[in-house]
Amino acid sequence: AMNESVIDRKIAEAQTGPPALANHVEHYCPNFIDQTTSDKLIEFLQGYDTNFNENCERGHGVISFGETYLYPGAKSVVPISKAMPEPLLALKSMIEKRHPGSVLNQCL
């Protein structure tokens, strides 16, 4: 059984959101992605324009790479690739370096 403090924390998170998300603006990093990385990501993603057009969620195209992640309304349930492509691996590495302990296993 969960102890009372765990229950209280879960109730508080349900009302205010997880603590890590509550102060995300405080961790904003301007220019986190440099121009070279941005160009590589844009060039990479432009190669999937047909996939984006075929998978629309709430008015925007989506595709996924990595592990399968299910949520209500998902249109891109099956990842294009289980392996993260290089441009996304570079971004993943940047995020994990800035936020040690992060586990990123999917990119949507």
Image (tube, grey):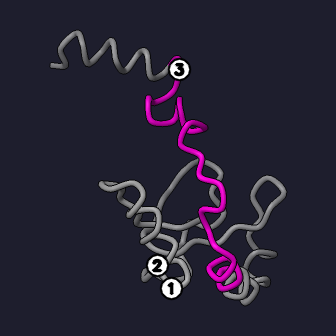
Q: Nearer the viewer, mark 2 or mark 1?
A: 2
**Residue nearest the observer in this picture, 4 or 93:** 93
Q: Which residue is mark 1?
A: 85
Q: Quadrant of residue 6?
A: top left
Residue 16 got which mark?
3
Q: Which residues are magenta?
A: 15-41
In which quadrant is the C terminus drawn? Answer: bottom right
Q: Position of residue 80 (x, y in %)?
A: 56, 81
Residue, x 47% and y 60% (percent of image)? 69
Give the residue at mark 2.
89
Placement of 19 over or under 57, stated as above or below: above
The foreground one among 86 and 49 is: 86
| Mark 1 element type | loop
Q: Residues within 10 Å of mark 1 (few under 14, many from 20)?
A: few
Which x, y percent locates residue 92?
Answer: 46, 70
x and y percentages locating residue 82 in the rendered image:
43, 80
